[in-house]
Image (cartoon, rainbow, N blue to C red):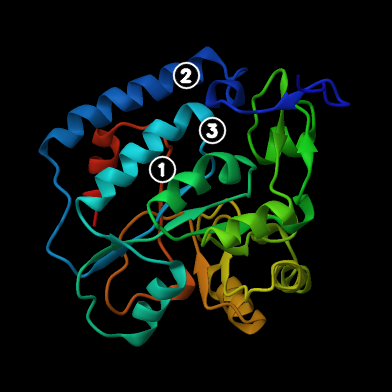
Amino acid sequence: MIDQPANGLFPTRLHSEFIATKPFKIRARWAARDLALRALSLTRRVDCDGGWIRFPYYHHVFDDERGGFERQLDYFSQFGEFISLSDAVTILESGDPIDGCYFCITFDDGFSSCLSGATPILAKRNIPALFYLVTDLMGRSLTPDDAIARDVFAFAGKDTTLDFLSWDDCRDMALAGMSFGSHTKSHARLADLKPETIETELRDSKQAIERELGQVCDHFCAPYGIPDSDFDPARDGASARAAGYRSFATGTRGAMRRGADPLSLTRDQMVANWGNHQLRYFLSQP
């Protein structure tokens, strides 16, 4: 028998728990969007002619999303090979032609489902993935009424907590072949910060990851992720380079091709229970 946690709540294990209090109008919008993309995807195809790297990224793989995540990995494997973020950046830095089609999987925020849901599936398939950590939240468990859970991570739980990876979790994941990058110390929107605070967010989170996990932290991901809204590409890209990062990930969709800048990585946001028609639609975009 599992003991009841001190706060009376258990960790979120299901996506349905994660969105338990989402309003009906938002759920209806999701359903309408899915129907529209199902129709639009009918005439789309994924480019298999080579010369690109795509960066699908996730936030969670809850217990009721595992089957969907495995299906999506199967779908990606029809069109390209899986490579690590460091290998992807090396290819882009070289400036050489990209001799195939590649996928690089990343996760934002460091939710605990990255260990329980995503890592076993990735490790079983020998797929490398990188997880961007918010270092001030390591090991935290947030209740539904916590402002960070609600306002920063859009957690709409009711009777469960939003839990984050601990350093020990990450060490276990590293043994399974996973790697880690920075998502700042506090999940701050860089556009709201002064340059010296940005410098601290990038430097301190990088140092914490390297100190705790014993691996170089070469990769940074901007929270929220929209260029010219959530961050300044020129200013913040330069800050990342000065802090010693090799890449800067954004939330802008699209493939990366020869000559693309690793300090402005485009990525395709995915949700593990989306159907293949949604993947086909987004991966058909240039």
Report the side of 65 relative to 83 (left or right).
right
Give whichever of discs 3 and 2 has the lower sequence position.
2
Give, as a three-letter code, the residue at label 2.
Answer: Arg
Quarter holding the C terminus is bottom left
Which amino acid does the dot numbered 1 rest on? Met
Tag 3: amino acid: Phe
Indicate the secondary structure of the residue bearing disc 2: helix
Q: Earlier in the sequence, mark 3 or mark 1?
A: 3
Q: Rounded to the nearest whole Å, what is the CA distance between mark 2 and mark 1?
A: 17 Å
Q: Which mark is residue 66?
A: none
Horizontal and vertical percent position of residue 228: 52, 60
Which residue in the structure is indicated by mark 1? 270
Q: How far across and down, in percent of the image, does residue 52 sit?
A: 25, 67
Q: Which residue lies at the image location 27% right of the left edge and 77% below the top edge?
A: 258
Front of the two marks 3 and 2: 3
Q: Residue furthest right?
A: 6
Report the quarter where the N terminus lies. Answer: top right
Q: Gap between marks 3 and 2, in whole Å? A: 18 Å
The residue at which mark 2 appears reads as: 27
Residue extending farthest top: 24
Tell me: residue 262, above or below residue 7: below
* Residue 31 vertical placement versus 91 (above, below): above
Q: Which residue is mark 3?
A: 62
Residue at left offset 23%, top offset 59%:
80
Q: Secondary structure at mark 3?
A: loop
Asked whether the viewer can see residue 279, the reply is yes
| Left/right of residue 146 with respect to residue 27 in the rendered view | right
